[in-house]
Amino acid sequence: MADDSKATDVGARYAQALFDLAVETKALTAIEADLAALKVMVSESQDLRTLLASPRFSAEDKAKGLEAVAKRAKMNPTTVRFLGVLAQNRRTAALAGVIRAFEGLAAAHRGLVAAEVVTAVPLTPAQTRDLTAALRQALGQDPQISARVDPAILGGLRVKVGSRLYDASLKSKLDSLKFALKRA
């Protein structure tokens, strides 16, 4: 758990640096789109995930691989350079944390609040609309929802906004029941 916290801290620092550069160069929208596309690429490509996480690849190999992916996707030159720096500094394993933190910074910059939603199955458009409305009412701000699927939660959902976690997953309810039965 501590290692995940360190990765998140590293990701947040790199995200802040990239965000500041994106605002300064007036490329926020382009870089945000690049990172969203990269997030999808990573989620869909086992080879890319292996390249990012495996210590078997040198920093140079990771930099070349990321540069090739970024150039093929016609990403902003700042994004391409950033990915090179991330690889050279041996921080590619923190890329998911960088993207998450950058999304939060960009959302806050636009007056939105970032909400990470985890569900057992993909949300329908109607469920997404209802969730957005419920979060808007609860938070008093417009949420920018980042959804991901994790079948391990069995059902329900988890919503993380900042440091707050709202856990209405079936797994967490079953774990609570199991704990209560052990105590009885």
Image: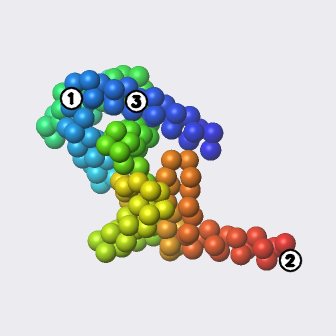
- Place residue 109 in its image quadrant: top left
Front-lying residue, 178 or 67: 178
Task: Mark 3: give few (<14), some (14-19) or many (20+) Cα within 10 Å.
Answer: some
- Place residue 33 in its image quadrant: top left
Q: Marks 3 and 1: which is nearer the front? A: 1
Q: Residue 90: x, y in percent? A: 42, 26
Q: Earlier in the sequence, mark 1 or mark 2?
A: 1
10 with respect to 35 (left or right): right
Front-lying residue, 155 or 19: 19
168 with respect to 126 (left or right): right
Front-lying residue, 133 or 17: 133
Q: Residue 58: x, y in percent? A: 38, 26
Q: Marks 1 and 2: which is nearer the front? A: 1
Q: Residue 22: x, y in percent? A: 27, 29
Q: Residue 49: x, y in percent? A: 36, 45
Location of mark 3 (residue): 16
